[in-house]
Image (cartoon, rainbow, N blue to C red):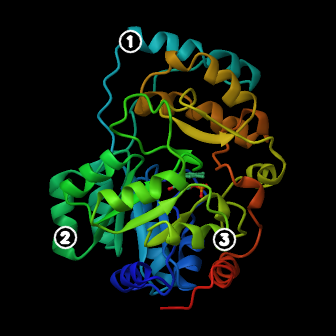
Protein backbone atom coordinates (compact mmCIF):
# COMPACT_ATOMS: atom_id res chain seq x y z
CA UNK A 1 0.00 0.00 0.00
CA UNK A 2 1.27 3.54 -0.74
CA UNK A 3 2.29 5.79 2.18
CA UNK A 4 -0.64 8.11 1.33
CA UNK A 5 -3.12 5.24 1.47
CA UNK A 6 -1.63 3.94 4.72
CA UNK A 7 -1.92 7.40 6.33
CA UNK A 8 -5.55 7.87 5.34
CA UNK A 9 -6.49 4.33 6.43
CA UNK A 10 -4.89 5.01 9.83
CA UNK A 11 -6.80 8.30 10.15
CA UNK A 12 -10.10 6.65 9.25
CA UNK A 13 -9.44 3.51 11.29
CA UNK A 14 -9.96 1.21 8.27
CA UNK A 15 -7.81 -1.61 6.87
CA UNK A 16 -8.19 -0.98 3.12
CA UNK A 17 -8.27 2.27 1.05
CA UNK A 18 -11.59 1.26 -0.53
CA UNK A 19 -14.68 3.46 -0.07
CA UNK A 20 -18.17 2.29 -1.08
CA UNK A 21 -19.80 5.44 -2.47
CA UNK A 22 -22.90 6.86 -0.82
CA UNK A 23 -25.83 6.36 -3.21
CA UNK A 24 -29.03 8.11 -2.19
CA UNK A 25 -32.40 6.75 -3.23
CA UNK A 26 -32.10 3.15 -2.09
CA UNK A 27 -28.90 1.33 -3.14
CA UNK A 28 -26.83 1.98 0.01
CA UNK A 29 -28.82 -0.01 2.56
CA UNK A 30 -27.48 -0.34 6.12
CA UNK A 31 -26.67 -3.96 5.19
CA UNK A 32 -24.43 -2.86 2.28
CA UNK A 33 -22.71 -0.14 4.32
CA UNK A 34 -22.07 -2.49 7.23
CA UNK A 35 -20.81 -5.32 5.00
CA UNK A 36 -18.24 -3.06 3.31
CA UNK A 37 -17.07 -1.52 6.59
CA UNK A 38 -16.92 -4.92 8.28
CA UNK A 39 -14.76 -6.19 5.40
CA UNK A 40 -12.18 -3.43 6.03
CA UNK A 41 -13.35 -0.71 3.61
CA UNK A 42 -15.43 2.37 4.38
CA UNK A 43 -19.16 1.91 3.79
CA UNK A 44 -21.18 5.10 3.17
CA UNK A 45 -24.89 5.67 3.73
CA UNK A 46 -26.44 7.94 1.07
CA UNK A 47 -28.86 9.80 3.34
CA UNK A 48 -29.83 12.78 1.17
CA UNK A 49 -33.40 11.51 0.63
CA UNK A 50 -33.89 10.24 4.19
CA UNK A 51 -35.85 11.99 6.95
CA UNK A 52 -34.05 12.62 10.26
CA UNK A 53 -35.90 9.66 11.81
CA UNK A 54 -34.83 7.39 8.92
CA UNK A 55 -31.21 8.55 9.33
CA UNK A 56 -31.27 7.68 13.04
CA UNK A 57 -32.84 4.31 12.29
CA UNK A 58 -30.34 3.47 9.52
CA UNK A 59 -27.44 4.54 11.76
CA UNK A 60 -28.65 2.28 14.57
CA UNK A 61 -29.02 -0.63 12.13
CA UNK A 62 -25.46 -0.17 10.82
CA UNK A 63 -24.19 -0.03 14.42
CA UNK A 64 -26.06 -3.23 15.23
CA UNK A 65 -24.34 -4.97 12.30
CA UNK A 66 -20.76 -3.74 12.75
CA UNK A 67 -18.52 -1.83 15.11
CA UNK A 68 -16.41 -0.62 12.15
CA UNK A 69 -16.22 3.05 11.02
CA UNK A 70 -18.68 4.24 8.37
CA UNK A 71 -19.74 7.45 6.58
CA UNK A 72 -23.05 9.30 6.17
CA UNK A 73 -23.62 11.58 3.16
CA UNK A 74 -25.98 14.52 2.61
CA UNK A 75 -26.57 17.00 -0.21
CA UNK A 76 -25.89 20.71 0.43
CA UNK A 77 -28.31 22.67 -1.76
CA UNK A 78 -29.63 26.22 -1.99
CA UNK A 79 -33.24 26.68 -0.80
CA UNK A 80 -36.03 26.47 -3.38
CA UNK A 81 -38.61 29.19 -3.91
CA UNK A 82 -40.04 28.69 -7.41
CA UNK A 83 -42.78 30.95 -8.76
CA UNK A 84 -45.99 29.48 -10.18
CA UNK A 85 -44.97 30.84 -13.62
CA UNK A 86 -41.72 28.89 -13.52
CA UNK A 87 -43.49 25.71 -12.44
CA UNK A 88 -46.02 25.57 -15.26
CA UNK A 89 -43.65 24.55 -18.08
CA UNK A 90 -41.82 22.22 -15.67
CA UNK A 91 -45.07 20.37 -14.92
CA UNK A 92 -46.10 20.34 -18.58
CA UNK A 93 -42.96 18.49 -19.75
CA UNK A 94 -43.67 15.64 -17.30
CA UNK A 95 -47.34 15.35 -18.24
CA UNK A 96 -46.93 12.81 -21.11
CA UNK A 97 -45.06 10.42 -18.80
CA UNK A 98 -47.80 10.72 -16.17
CA UNK A 99 -50.38 9.87 -18.81
CA UNK A 100 -48.37 6.88 -20.01
CA UNK A 101 -48.03 5.55 -16.45
CA UNK A 102 -51.68 6.11 -15.58
CA UNK A 103 -50.89 8.78 -12.97
CA UNK A 104 -52.90 11.94 -12.22
CA UNK A 105 -51.49 15.11 -13.84
CA UNK A 106 -48.23 16.35 -12.24
CA UNK A 107 -48.92 18.66 -9.27
CA UNK A 108 -47.03 21.02 -6.99
CA UNK A 109 -45.94 19.16 -3.81
CA UNK A 110 -46.35 20.45 -0.23
CA UNK A 111 -42.59 20.71 0.38
CA UNK A 112 -39.36 20.77 -1.60
CA UNK A 113 -37.61 18.12 0.49
CA UNK A 114 -35.84 17.53 3.78
CA UNK A 115 -34.15 20.35 5.69
CA UNK A 116 -30.36 20.02 5.81
CA UNK A 117 -30.23 21.30 9.40
CA UNK A 118 -32.64 18.63 10.63
CA UNK A 119 -30.87 15.89 8.67
CA UNK A 120 -27.48 17.07 9.96
CA UNK A 121 -28.71 17.05 13.57
CA UNK A 122 -29.63 13.37 13.07
CA UNK A 123 -26.19 12.68 11.55
CA UNK A 124 -24.53 14.16 14.65
CA UNK A 125 -26.70 11.98 16.86
CA UNK A 126 -25.56 8.88 14.95
CA UNK A 127 -21.94 10.13 15.10
CA UNK A 128 -20.31 8.41 12.09
CA UNK A 129 -16.51 8.46 11.59
CA UNK A 130 -17.02 10.46 8.38
CA UNK A 131 -19.59 13.03 7.24
CA UNK A 132 -19.53 13.60 3.49
CA UNK A 133 -21.38 16.11 1.33
CA UNK A 134 -22.17 16.49 -2.36
CA UNK A 135 -22.91 19.73 -4.31
CA UNK A 136 -21.04 21.98 -1.77
CA UNK A 137 -19.06 22.00 1.46
CA UNK A 138 -21.16 21.87 4.63
CA UNK A 139 -21.90 25.27 6.23
CA UNK A 140 -19.03 26.51 8.47
CA UNK A 141 -20.99 25.75 11.66
CA UNK A 142 -21.52 22.14 10.54
CA UNK A 143 -17.80 21.72 9.78
CA UNK A 144 -17.03 23.10 13.26
CA UNK A 145 -19.53 20.72 14.87
CA UNK A 146 -17.85 17.78 13.11
CA UNK A 147 -14.37 18.90 14.13
CA UNK A 148 -15.44 19.16 17.80
CA UNK A 149 -16.65 15.54 17.66
CA UNK A 150 -13.70 14.14 15.68
CA UNK A 151 -15.88 13.46 12.60
CA UNK A 152 -13.89 13.83 9.36
CA UNK A 153 -15.53 15.93 6.62
CA UNK A 154 -15.35 14.87 2.95
CA UNK A 155 -16.80 16.90 0.04
CA UNK A 156 -16.87 16.31 -3.72
CA UNK A 157 -14.81 18.36 -6.20
CA UNK A 158 -14.87 18.02 -9.98
CA UNK A 159 -12.12 20.55 -10.79
CA UNK A 160 -8.83 21.60 -9.11
CA UNK A 161 -10.40 25.02 -8.33
CA UNK A 162 -13.28 23.36 -6.47
CA UNK A 163 -10.80 21.20 -4.53
CA UNK A 164 -8.82 24.29 -3.48
CA UNK A 165 -12.04 26.02 -2.39
CA UNK A 166 -13.00 23.01 -0.27
CA UNK A 167 -9.58 22.89 1.38
CA UNK A 168 -9.87 26.62 2.18
CA UNK A 169 -13.34 25.99 3.69
CA UNK A 170 -11.82 23.49 6.14
CA UNK A 171 -12.88 20.21 4.55
CA UNK A 172 -10.59 17.36 5.75
CA UNK A 173 -10.60 15.20 2.62
CA UNK A 174 -11.51 15.94 -1.02
CA UNK A 175 -13.52 13.43 -3.08
CA UNK A 176 -12.27 13.92 -6.66
CA UNK A 177 -15.14 12.84 -8.93
CA UNK A 178 -14.17 12.19 -12.54
CA UNK A 179 -16.48 12.48 -15.56
CA UNK A 180 -16.95 8.70 -15.80
CA UNK A 181 -18.78 8.66 -12.46
CA UNK A 182 -22.35 7.45 -12.10
CA UNK A 183 -25.00 9.57 -10.41
CA UNK A 184 -24.96 13.32 -9.90
CA UNK A 185 -21.90 15.37 -10.61
CA UNK A 186 -20.86 17.32 -7.52
CA UNK A 187 -19.88 20.38 -9.58
CA UNK A 188 -20.44 23.67 -7.74
CA UNK A 189 -18.13 26.27 -9.32
CA UNK A 190 -17.83 25.38 -13.01
CA UNK A 191 -20.84 27.18 -14.50
CA UNK A 192 -22.42 24.71 -16.87
CA UNK A 193 -20.26 21.63 -16.31
CA UNK A 194 -19.82 21.72 -20.09
CA UNK A 195 -16.65 19.64 -20.34
CA UNK A 196 -16.34 17.34 -17.33
CA UNK A 197 -12.79 16.18 -16.60
CA UNK A 198 -12.07 12.43 -16.66
CA UNK A 199 -10.70 10.62 -13.59
CA UNK A 200 -7.27 10.00 -15.16
CA UNK A 201 -6.67 13.74 -15.66
CA UNK A 202 -8.57 15.01 -12.58
CA UNK A 203 -6.97 12.99 -9.79
CA UNK A 204 -3.33 14.06 -10.30
CA UNK A 205 -4.40 17.69 -10.88
CA UNK A 206 -6.35 17.73 -7.61
CA UNK A 207 -3.59 15.85 -5.76
CA UNK A 208 -1.22 18.63 -6.85
CA UNK A 209 -3.68 21.43 -6.00
CA UNK A 210 -4.37 20.53 -2.34
CA UNK A 211 -2.53 19.27 0.72
CA UNK A 212 -5.46 17.33 2.15
CA UNK A 213 -5.92 13.67 1.16
CA UNK A 214 -7.81 12.84 -2.04
CA UNK A 215 -10.35 10.04 -2.57
CA UNK A 216 -10.70 9.28 -6.30
CA UNK A 217 -13.91 8.16 -8.01
CA UNK A 218 -15.35 7.73 -11.49
CA UNK A 219 -15.25 4.52 -13.51
CA UNK A 220 -13.28 2.54 -10.90
CA UNK A 221 -14.76 -0.96 -11.05
CA UNK A 222 -12.13 -3.36 -9.69
CA UNK A 223 -8.59 -3.76 -8.35
CA UNK A 224 -7.05 -2.47 -11.58
CA UNK A 225 -8.88 0.83 -11.19
CA UNK A 226 -8.05 1.07 -7.49
CA UNK A 227 -4.33 0.52 -8.18
CA UNK A 228 -4.50 3.17 -10.92
CA UNK A 229 -6.21 5.70 -8.60
CA UNK A 230 -3.53 5.20 -5.94
CA UNK A 231 -0.78 5.53 -8.59
CA UNK A 232 -2.32 8.87 -9.67
CA UNK A 233 -1.91 10.31 -6.18
CA UNK A 234 -5.18 9.41 -4.47
CA UNK A 235 -5.14 8.12 -0.89
CA UNK A 236 -8.17 5.90 -1.50
CA UNK A 237 -10.61 4.89 -4.24
CA UNK A 238 -14.39 5.33 -4.07
CA UNK A 239 -16.59 2.95 -6.05
CA UNK A 240 -20.31 3.35 -6.60
CA UNK A 241 -21.48 1.44 -9.66
CA UNK A 242 -19.27 -1.54 -8.72
CA UNK A 243 -21.45 -2.08 -5.61
CA UNK A 244 -24.85 -1.53 -7.27
CA UNK A 245 -25.37 -5.22 -8.15
CA UNK A 246 -24.43 -6.63 -4.71
CA UNK A 247 -27.17 -8.71 -3.09
CA UNK A 248 -27.06 -6.31 -0.09
CA UNK A 249 -27.66 -3.26 -2.30
CA UNK A 250 -31.22 -1.88 -2.43
CA UNK A 251 -30.89 -1.18 -6.17
CA UNK A 252 -34.09 -1.96 -8.13
CA UNK A 253 -33.83 -5.48 -9.69
CA UNK A 254 -34.30 -4.05 -13.22
CA UNK A 255 -31.51 -1.53 -12.57
CA UNK A 256 -29.22 -4.38 -11.43
CA UNK A 257 -30.11 -6.34 -14.56
CA UNK A 258 -29.62 -3.35 -16.88
CA UNK A 259 -26.02 -2.79 -15.69
CA UNK A 260 -24.94 -5.77 -17.80
CA UNK A 261 -27.17 -5.00 -20.78
CA UNK A 262 -27.50 -1.23 -21.29
CA UNK A 263 -26.05 0.45 -24.35
CA UNK A 264 -23.83 2.76 -22.36
CA UNK A 265 -24.59 5.84 -20.29
CA UNK A 266 -25.37 9.53 -20.83
CA UNK A 267 -25.18 12.77 -18.87
CA UNK A 268 -28.30 14.87 -18.45
CA UNK A 269 -29.72 17.55 -16.13
CA UNK A 270 -33.17 16.98 -17.62
CA UNK A 271 -34.35 14.45 -15.02
CA UNK A 272 -33.39 16.13 -11.73
CA UNK A 273 -32.19 19.64 -12.59
CA UNK A 274 -28.54 18.67 -11.88
CA UNK A 275 -26.20 16.93 -14.28
CA UNK A 276 -26.18 13.19 -13.60
CA UNK A 277 -24.91 10.08 -15.42
CA UNK A 278 -27.26 7.16 -15.93
CA UNK A 279 -27.94 4.21 -18.20
CA UNK A 280 -29.18 5.49 -21.54
CA UNK A 281 -32.93 4.91 -21.91
CA UNK A 282 -36.09 6.62 -23.16
CA UNK A 283 -36.65 8.71 -20.01
CA UNK A 284 -33.16 10.21 -20.04
CA UNK A 285 -33.10 10.74 -23.81
CA UNK A 286 -36.52 12.46 -23.84
CA UNK A 287 -35.92 14.72 -20.82
CA UNK A 288 -32.47 15.67 -22.15
CA UNK A 289 -34.08 17.20 -25.28
CA UNK A 290 -35.73 20.04 -23.32
CA UNK A 291 -33.41 19.94 -20.29
CA UNK A 292 -33.16 23.73 -20.36
CA UNK A 293 -36.83 23.88 -19.25
CA UNK A 294 -36.08 21.90 -16.07
CA UNK A 295 -35.91 24.00 -12.89
CA UNK A 296 -33.10 23.55 -10.34
CA UNK A 297 -32.54 20.33 -8.46
CA UNK A 298 -34.72 20.77 -5.37
CA UNK A 299 -37.74 21.55 -7.50
CA UNK A 300 -37.19 19.31 -10.54
CA UNK A 301 -36.15 16.27 -8.49
CA UNK A 302 -39.30 16.58 -6.43
CA UNK A 303 -41.55 17.10 -9.48
CA UNK A 304 -40.11 14.01 -11.21
CA UNK A 305 -40.44 11.89 -8.04
CA UNK A 306 -43.95 10.46 -8.66
CA UNK A 307 -43.21 9.38 -12.23
CA UNK A 308 -39.94 7.73 -11.23
CA UNK A 309 -41.61 5.92 -8.34
CA UNK A 310 -44.46 4.72 -10.57
CA UNK A 311 -42.05 3.54 -13.28
CA UNK A 312 -40.09 1.54 -10.68
CA UNK A 313 -43.26 0.11 -9.17
CA UNK A 314 -44.67 -0.87 -12.57
CA UNK A 315 -41.34 -2.38 -13.67
CA UNK A 316 -40.93 0.04 -16.60
CA UNK A 317 -37.13 0.15 -16.97
CA UNK A 318 -37.34 2.52 -19.97
CA UNK A 319 -38.91 5.17 -17.70
CA UNK A 320 -36.68 4.68 -14.64
CA UNK A 321 -33.65 6.85 -13.85
CA UNK A 322 -30.94 4.21 -13.43
CA UNK A 323 -27.85 6.16 -12.39
CA UNK A 324 -24.59 4.35 -13.24
CA UNK A 325 -21.03 5.09 -14.30
CA UNK A 326 -19.30 4.36 -17.58
CA UNK A 327 -17.81 1.10 -16.27
CA UNK A 328 -21.26 -0.43 -15.61
CA UNK A 329 -20.63 -3.61 -17.58
CA UNK A 330 -17.90 -4.54 -15.08
CA UNK A 331 -20.34 -4.60 -12.12
CA UNK A 332 -20.53 -8.05 -10.50
CA UNK A 333 -23.40 -9.45 -8.44
CA UNK A 334 -21.13 -10.68 -5.62
CA UNK A 335 -21.69 -10.20 -1.87
CA UNK A 336 -20.05 -6.93 -0.76
CA UNK A 337 -17.48 -8.57 1.54
CA UNK A 338 -16.33 -10.83 -1.30
CA UNK A 339 -16.09 -7.84 -3.66
CA UNK A 340 -13.95 -5.91 -1.18
CA UNK A 341 -11.65 -8.94 -0.66
CA UNK A 342 -11.37 -9.43 -4.43
CA UNK A 343 -10.59 -5.73 -5.04
CA UNK A 344 -7.84 -5.85 -2.39
CA UNK A 345 -6.33 -8.97 -3.94
CA UNK A 346 -6.48 -7.57 -7.49
CA UNK A 347 -4.93 -4.26 -6.40
CA UNK A 348 -2.18 -6.05 -4.46
CA UNK A 349 -3.23 -4.33 -1.21
CA UNK A 350 -2.20 -5.80 2.11
CA UNK A 351 -4.44 -4.90 5.03
CA UNK A 352 -3.14 -1.91 7.00
C1 LIG B 1 -26.78 5.30 -8.19
C2 LIG B 1 -25.80 6.34 -7.72
C3 LIG B 1 -26.20 7.24 -6.73
C4 LIG B 1 -25.29 8.19 -6.22
N1 LIG B 1 -25.67 9.00 -5.18
C5 LIG B 1 -24.73 9.78 -4.57
C6 LIG B 1 -25.04 10.46 -3.35
O1 LIG B 1 -26.15 10.37 -2.81
N2 LIG B 1 -24.07 11.24 -2.78
C7 LIG B 1 -22.81 11.35 -3.34
O2 LIG B 1 -21.97 12.04 -2.77
N3 LIG B 1 -22.50 10.70 -4.49
C8 LIG B 1 -23.42 9.92 -5.09
N4 LIG B 1 -23.07 9.23 -6.25
C9 LIG B 1 -21.73 9.43 -6.84
C10 LIG B 1 -20.65 8.63 -6.13
O3 LIG B 1 -20.26 9.27 -4.94
C11 LIG B 1 -19.38 8.46 -6.98
O4 LIG B 1 -18.87 9.69 -7.37
C12 LIG B 1 -19.61 7.60 -8.22
O5 LIG B 1 -20.38 6.48 -7.93
C13 LIG B 1 -18.27 7.17 -8.77
O6 LIG B 1 -18.38 6.63 -10.05
P1 LIG B 1 -18.70 5.08 -10.37
O7 LIG B 1 -20.18 4.97 -10.18
O8 LIG B 1 -18.25 4.91 -11.75
O9 LIG B 1 -17.97 4.26 -9.35
C14 LIG B 1 -23.97 8.27 -6.77
C15 LIG B 1 -23.61 7.38 -7.78
C16 LIG B 1 -24.49 6.42 -8.25
C17 LIG B 1 -24.03 5.45 -9.30
Q: Is mark 2 within 8 Å of ligand 1?
A: no
Q: Nearer the viewer, residue 17 or 321?
A: 17
Q: Mark 2: give few (<14), some (14-19) or many (20+) Cα within 10 Å.
A: some
Q: Nearer the viewer, residue 285 or 187?
A: 187
Position of residue 248 measured from the top left corner of the image (x, y, whole percent): 67, 70
The residue singled out by tag 2 in the image is 147
Mark 1 / mark 3, whichever is N-terminal? 1
Does 48 sit above or below residue 318? below
Q: Is residue 16 left or right of residue 169?
A: right
Mark 2 / mark 3, whichever is N-terminal? 2
Q: Secondary structure at mark 1?
A: helix
Q: Nearer the viewer, mark 1 or mark 3?
A: 3
- Residue at point 48%, 62% (across, down): 216
- Residue at point 50%, 85% (across, down): 1
Q: Nearer the viewer, mark 2 or mark 3?
A: 3
Alpha-carbon span between mark 2 and mark 3: 34 Å
Q: Are marks 1 and 3 in contact (CB under 8 Å)?
A: no
Q: Is residue 91 left or right of residue 279?
A: left
The residue singled out by tag 1 in the image is 84
Position of residue 4 measured from the top left corner of the image (x, y, whole percent): 39, 78
Does 234 sit above or below residue 160? below
Alpha-carbon span between mark 2 and mark 1: 41 Å
Q: Secondary structure at mark 3?
A: helix
The residue singled out by tag 3 in the image is 224
Instruction: Write down the quadrant of residue 191 in the picture.
Output: top left
- Residue at point 19%, 55% (across, down): 168
Position of residue 241 measured from the top left corner of the image (x, y, whole percent): 64, 58
Amino acid sequence: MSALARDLCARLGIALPIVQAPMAGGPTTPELVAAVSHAGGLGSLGAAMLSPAQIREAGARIRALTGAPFAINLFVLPPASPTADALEPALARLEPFHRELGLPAPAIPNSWGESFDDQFAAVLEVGPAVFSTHFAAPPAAAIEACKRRGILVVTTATTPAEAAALEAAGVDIVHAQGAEAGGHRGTFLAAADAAPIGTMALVPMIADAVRVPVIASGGIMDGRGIAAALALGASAAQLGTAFLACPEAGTHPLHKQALAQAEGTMLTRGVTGRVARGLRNRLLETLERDAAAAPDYRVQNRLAGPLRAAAAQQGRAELMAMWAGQGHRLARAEPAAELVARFAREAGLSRG
